[in-house]
Amino acid sequence: MDWWYLFFLAGPAIYAGTAVRGTVRKALKTRHKRKLALIEARREERLALESADRPPAPVCGCEHHLAKHDKQGKCHELVRTAVAWDADQRPARYEARPCACQQYVGPQPLSQVYAEDLTDLA
């Protein structure tokens, strides 16, 4: 029997199957990347909505909370300060020193805002 002609028919079919498999793999990879981008966009949107719902945190320019400042505005937090440097001008040793911040300038909490009474009690 002559089966040699089957090789001529099977060759293009095998090649077409390989090409289809490559196209499907590429499409699935693109879909996966788009799905990951969509998930990341949803996460960023959720975080933005959550942060928009919160009032501003009373944080000073020195990045310490208002609770670390006294009534005059002086900060009482300790910070890590470089006191020695190596030959490449990189910090080699640190010490804890008081924060040099002098004044809290962030948003005032509502409990410290004065508001007049809206109704006359007399």
Image (tube, grey):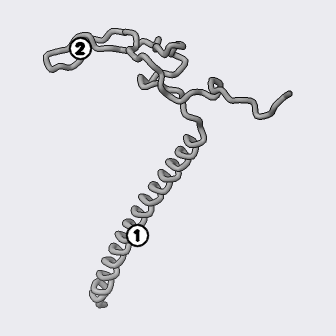
Q: Which element carries disc 1, helix, strand or loop?
A: helix
| Quadrant of the rendering where the C terminus is positioned | top right
In contact (CB < 8 Å): disc 1 and disc 2: no
Q: Residue at x 48, y 22 (%)?
A: 104
Task: Residue 85 in the image: state x and y as whole percent.
Answer: 20, 14
Residue 32, above or below 119: below
Distance from the alpha carbon under mark 1 to that under mark 2: 56 Å
Residue 112 position within the rendered picture, expressed as x and y whole percent measured from the top left? 62, 23
Q: Quadrant of the N terminus?
A: bottom left
Q: Nearer the viewer, residue 16 or 31?
A: 31
Q: Where residue 4 appears, x then y in whole percent?
A: 27, 87
**Type of amino acid under label 2:** Ala
Name the residue tied to disc 1.
24
Q: Earlier in the sequence, mark 1 or mark 2?
A: 1
Q: Badge 2 is on which residue?
A: 92
Q: Amino acid at mark 1?
A: Val
Q: Residues within 10 Å of mark 1 (few under 14, many from 20)?
A: few
The quadrant in which residue 50 appears is top right
